[in-house]
Image (cartoon, grey):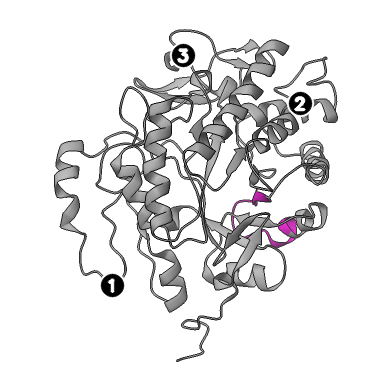
Amino acid sequence: MSTTPHTTLDQPLLRPVDLGDLRLPNRVVMAPLTRARAANPGLVPTELHAAYYAQRASAGLIVTEATWVGEQAIGFVDVPGIYHEEQVAGWRRVTDAVHALGGRIVLQLWHTGAASHPDHLGGRRPAGPSAVNPHLKSFTRGGFQETVTPREMSTAEIAATVADYRAAAANARRAGFDGVEVAAHGSYLIAQFLHPRLNRRTDGYGGDRAGRRRLLLEIVDAVAEPWDGRRVGVRLAPYLALGDRFPVDEGTLADHEALAVELNEHPVAYLHLRGPDGAPGFEEIARYRRLFHGPLIANNGFDRESANAAIEAGTSDAVSFATHFIANPDLVTRFAQGRELAAGDPGTYYGGGAVGYIDYPASTDSSRSSAVTAASTSSGSSARPTAK
């Protein structure tokens, strides 16, 4: 067997690792990818979802698309939920398929908060930490809509939201998931509470750094309750700037660094860190490696070589890949054998049916499988614009 860097099976990415109580056979993680394929009134995962995730079961860990914890969380079309029994049954078909192929899969939990729109909520205004418009756009049935000024959440609504997360985690366990990941990044509810421009509260959920991170920490503790051991991940994106309400500055970076230290005192299996845009941010990720004492998954801008280098240097324990997994369901095999990566079609990233979703072939295939023809004909392809 060749021992060149392009063909060796002794790459750092291919070594097993434990993330809390999640035991992974390799360190190639599938990052969460919103694909908007739950095009049914109940927002239920379908057979397409089961096929899609099963195709990618060779990943050391799959983190699913972000999933609604309740009806008040909704802020994007055709995204599945985990808050009623039909959704639990749909996700059980997904986890059974992944586990049958030897995979591991965790569910990412999502609430858009003020980044939603009344079109998603029966005409009701979204709720957020404070009555501050996040100046974003929400993708609705009518296309992109400007966000509105939200209602400030009452403490009772905050408690109900934490309860929704707890129930969603319990549902995820019943659905057969191996754990859950809390989405605390981007422009969504938890990130809104973390950010001083959106969170202007003066009660125990605002006012200072400790108050702003209280919601996240309560959610982490709540979603850990249904699980044995450490099976809760947290995703942060301290270097992600979005519009005028979510800048990256010394204050927000200091807040995130203090939060990373605080997470050491909570039942967190791993920290999933989105680094800065551009080339992989080794220095920035290494900083969080020193602050957070548990396992760390690095994300954003990595290829096989840089991912191997990050793991070999001890900067991260695993590396997650997003768009690479869209067109390369056998990404682990391609990394292991040094094969070329396929490119995805952005026009089919969001919405539609089988086309651009489950018809990307493994690298040994000469053409896309005809097995999805019937599904693609019945489901159609998406003409919606991308939303990221």
State the residue at coordinates (59%, 56%).
278
Give the percent coordinates (x, y) of residue 233: 64, 46
Disc 1 marks which residue? 364
Q: Is residue 63 left or right of residue 20?
A: left
Kind of element beneath mark 2 = loop
Which residue lies at the image location 59% right of the left edge and 69% below the top edge?
A: 16
- Residue located 73% across and 21% down the image: 199
State the residue position of label 3. Answer: 121
Q: CA distance from mark 2 to mark 3?
A: 26 Å
Mark 1 / mark 3, whichever is N-terminal:
3
Front residue (pair 163, 66)? 163
Left or right of 198 on screen, residue 145:
left
The range drawn in magenta is 270-285
Residue type beneath disc 3: Leu
Quadrant of the rendering where the N terminus is positioned = bottom left
The kind of secondary structure element at disc 1 is loop
Q: Residue at x 61, y 62 (%)?
A: 318
Residue 275 colored magenta?
yes
Work out whether 281 lies above or below 133.
below
Does residue 120 lie above or below 217 as drawn?
A: above
Q: Would you name the residue on which mark 2 appears?
A: 196
Closer to the observer: label 1 or label 2?
1
